[in-house]
Amino acid sequence: MKNILVLHTGGTISMQEDTQSGAVAPSLDHPLMDFTEAFKNLAYITTKQPFHLPSPHIRPAEMLTLKNLIEAECKQQSFNGVVITHGTDTLEETAYFLDLTLNIHIPIVITGAMRSSNEIGSDGLYNFISAVRVACCNEAKDKGVLVVLNDEIHAAKNVTKTHASNVSTFQSPQFGPIGLVTKREILFHYKPLYREKYDIEQISKRVALLKAYAGMEADVLDAIDDKKYDGVVIEALGQGNLPPCCLPGLKRLRKANIPIIVVSRCFKGVAQDVYDYQGGGKQLKEMGVIFSNGLNGQKARIKLLIALTKTTNQNKLSQIFQDPVCENEN
Ligand code: ASP
């Protein structure tokens, strides 16, 4: 028997549909709070509910609370795994935050649901059971934070919510799931190669996330400086290009030493300094814009929030956003 810590944080998995109006809202009592019967021969469950929020209400402050709680609980008791239930809207951000900040070797698994607890085809209980099964699995250790929904196991770094309502919403667009949940087994196929850890105690910086578009102008970027943000992530066009009208805004941010991270607004591929024209990636890099290797915008923002607690030095930030590459490609 394994010892599993379950942390319920809210989300659709904890909600109920009003059968008259069809509106979905948090229910007073979490429907999974005392659920243990499927785990009789598998695990002892210890349940806590640090907060009960729809995931659009979750901020980095709650993510830090979760990290601290997991560390404190694991110090007190020897758990074999942790399962977190969470709203799906920002689940990938919490998963990546914990992936970057927790230095714990037992499986940490996050799950949620697309259909609330009393809806036809509700996926909450099924996903919860799957998540506990994965957390009980020795193979799930040391693979970083895992996201388990709809019979798939994804790495926190790559997974993203791809569909507004479909139960197969969580996908890892470039890489696919790292494992599968079947009726009888938990099957892993890959292990994430590179892991990073940042030891943080507080999170206080403000980082904005902008999406580039045809005709984007500099005043949008001016607002980042005016409003005293500590950094900005831009989902740039294609391989990492921006409209030339943005350039004065980018120059202003660099002059104010506000870090600018560029990712691609394409959901696959990597932003790089390839194009050599006004606003092209090459020019952006020369201006001091930092290119991130393949993270989506919301994850690059989480990473910058964490990185800024360690350093505001431009070179160090560049290194943090540079994934290891093969030696002969350096
Ligand atoms: N809006 C809900 C939330 O993120 C969606 C969900 O949980 O699936 O809390």
Image (tube, helix red, strand yellow):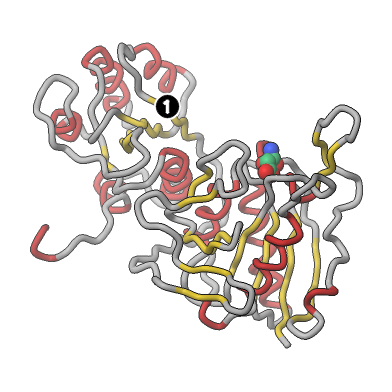
Q: Residue furthest bottom?
A: 1
Above or below residue 87? Residue 234 is: above
Q: Quadrant of the N terminus?
A: bottom right
Task: Report x, y in % for residue 44.
Answer: 79, 80
Image position of 173 (left or right of 120): left
For image coordinates 21% across by 34% down, the residue present is: 288
Asked whether 189 or 111 is in front, the reply is 189
Q: Residue at x 42, y 38 (%)?
A: 297
Q: Which residue is mark 1?
A: 210
Vertical arrangement, residue 281 with respect to residue 105, above or below: above
* Residue 116 or residue 199, whichever sits in front: 116
- In the displayed structure image, the side of residue 107 where residue 284 appears, left or right: left
**Residue 158 picture location, percent across and down:** 42, 53
Task: Locate residue 68: give its quadrant.
Answer: bottom right
Name which quarter of the figure residue 7 lies in. bottom right
Horizontal side of 231 relative to 81 (left or right) equals: left
Q: Looking at the picture, how far across and down is residue 183, in whole percent?
A: 64, 74
Describe the element under mark 1 as helix, strand or loop: strand
The image quadrant of residue 17 is top right
Task: Specify the amino acid type for callout 1.
Answer: Leu
- In percent of width and height, residue 147 lies at 56, 59
